[in-house]
Image (cartoon, rainbow, N blue to C red):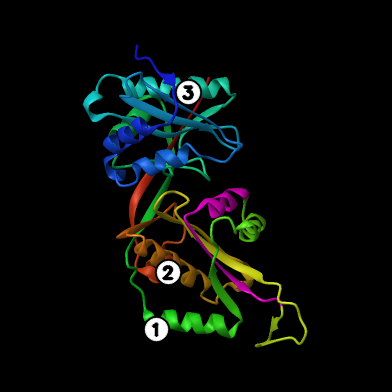
């Protein structure tokens, strides 16, 4: 029986993740750091073998379900039952915290992937061998950087926003409370946390004094936020992004997306993952993104 014990998330786990997660080697260490710094109210743990041949991050979701957020086994130690032992230890921890179900699925707002990347075949085989059922499919899109788009369309979008009195700006870290409040009101707490903790955050706003192409005399410019886009909440990935109903049709989303991707390119990235995508057509048309990574989400009841 392989021993699995609670441990601190440290450099040894970052190195293990980089060695084990070949499709995410570039940001594996960053993902470990992100998972080790979740929202303050999250219930979570890290379990590992004594020699750090394998480790698993587990957490409890807002609905009470247990999540296997990340599992990594050193390639040199595979075939020894370590993966099975890690999942078993994680499930016991989940039961102790009252979880009725275990999932191989992302636990937003702080997650590594939506589910198991289909390229990590041994992980998918392990889940199925342990009785997990696949219940959903998710996907990412990839945008090459610098992003490719129609410059004339972009200039037209900027002109349209200017004519409507809309300004696009960056929200520096530590100065995001107003944007986060907008995101929380329009969408949910999870996206608000991601907006506050992202590497980059951009938003669009319109002065409340601006009406029908002009500012009203003596009116206070109170700044109505219309949309936002973030990157780096999940290290190196783009998202989340949202536009308020009042601003749809103005091109706010395209402009915010391109600003974020330009910032990611300036930071040295040659591509950006657009995580957990819904509207394929929007991203394909706006920046030439392509559907690329596919994730299987698994679950099973905990007896």
| SS of the residue under disc 1 | helix
Q: Is residue 196 magenta?
A: yes
The reply to whether dot 3 and dot 2 touch (C-beta < 8 Å) is no
| SS of the residue under disc 2 | helix
Q: CA distance from mark 3 to mark 2?
A: 41 Å
Q: Earlier along the polypeptide chain: callout 3 or callout 1?
A: 3
Q: Nearer the viewer, mark 3 or mark 1?
A: 1
User: Is 178 drawn above or below residue 87 in the view shown?
Assistant: below
Q: In the image, 221: left or right of 239?
A: right
Q: Position of residue 105 (x, y in %)?
A: 46, 38
Q: Position of residue 114 (x, y in %)?
A: 43, 44
Q: Nearer the viewer, mark 3 or mark 2?
A: 2
Residue 180, by quadrant, is bottom right
- Tell me if mark 3 has few (under 14), some (14-19) or many (20+) residues whose alpha carbon lies within 10 angstroms of its own: many
Say which residue label 1 marks.
Answer: 152
- Tell me if mark 2 has few (under 14), some (14-19) or many (20+) residues whose alpha carbon lies within 10 angstroms of its own: some
Q: Residue at x 34, y 30 (%)?
A: 12
User: Is 174 drawn above or below residue 161 in the view shown?
Assistant: above
Decide if residue 128 is in sight here.
Answer: no
Residue 221, by quadrant, is bottom right
Say which residue label 3 marks.
Answer: 91
Say which residue label 2 marks.
Answer: 258
Q: Nearer the viewer, mark 1 or mark 2?
A: 2
Q: Earlier along the polypeptide chain: callout 1 or callout 2?
A: 1
- Tell me if mark 1 has few (under 14), some (14-19) or many (20+) residues whose alpha carbon lies within 10 angstroms of its own: few
Q: Which residues are magenta?
A: 189-208
Q: CA distance from mark 3 to mark 1?
A: 54 Å
Q: Position of residue 284 (x, y in %)?
A: 38, 66
Q: CA distance from mark 1 to mark 2?
A: 14 Å
């Amino acid at each position: 029986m392989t021993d699995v014990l609670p441990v601190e998330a440290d450099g040894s786990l970052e190195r293990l993740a980089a060695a084990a997660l070949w499709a995410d080697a570039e940001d594996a260490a960053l993902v470990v750091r992100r998972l080790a710094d979740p929202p303050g109210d999250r219930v979570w743990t890290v379990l590992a073998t004594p020699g750090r041949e394998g480790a698993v991050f587990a957490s409890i979701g807002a609905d009470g379900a247990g999540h296997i957020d990340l599992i990594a086994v050193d390639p040199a130690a595979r075939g020894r039952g370590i993966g099975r032992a890690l999942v078993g230890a994680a499930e016991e921890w989940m039961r102790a915290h009252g979880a009725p179900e275990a999932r191989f699925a992302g636990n937003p707002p702080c997650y590594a992937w939506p589910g198991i990347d289909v390229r990590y075949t041994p992980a998918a085989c392990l889940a199925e061998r342990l009785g997990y059922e696949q219940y959903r499919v998710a996907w990412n899109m990839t945008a090459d950087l610098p992003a490719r788009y129609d410059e004339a369309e972009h200039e037209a979008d900027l002109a349209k926003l200017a004519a409507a009195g809309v300004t696009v700006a960056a929200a520096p870290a530590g100065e995001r409370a107003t944007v986060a409040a907008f995101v929380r009101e329009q969408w949910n707490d999870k996206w608000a946390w991601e907006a506050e903790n992202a590497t980059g955050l951009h938003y669009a706003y319109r002065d409340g004094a601006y009406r029908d192409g002009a500012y009203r005399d003596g009116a206070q410019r109170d700044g109505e936020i219309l949309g936002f886009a973030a990157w780096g909440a999940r290290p190196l990935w783009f998202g989340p992004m949202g536009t308020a109903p009042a601003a749809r049709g103005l091109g706010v989303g395209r402009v915010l997306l391109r600003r974020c991707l330009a910032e990611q390119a300036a930071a040295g990235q040659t591509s950006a993952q657009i995580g957990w995508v819904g509207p394929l057509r929007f991203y394909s048309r706006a920046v030439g993104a392509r559907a690329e990574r596919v994730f299987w989400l698994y679950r099973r009841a905990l007896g």
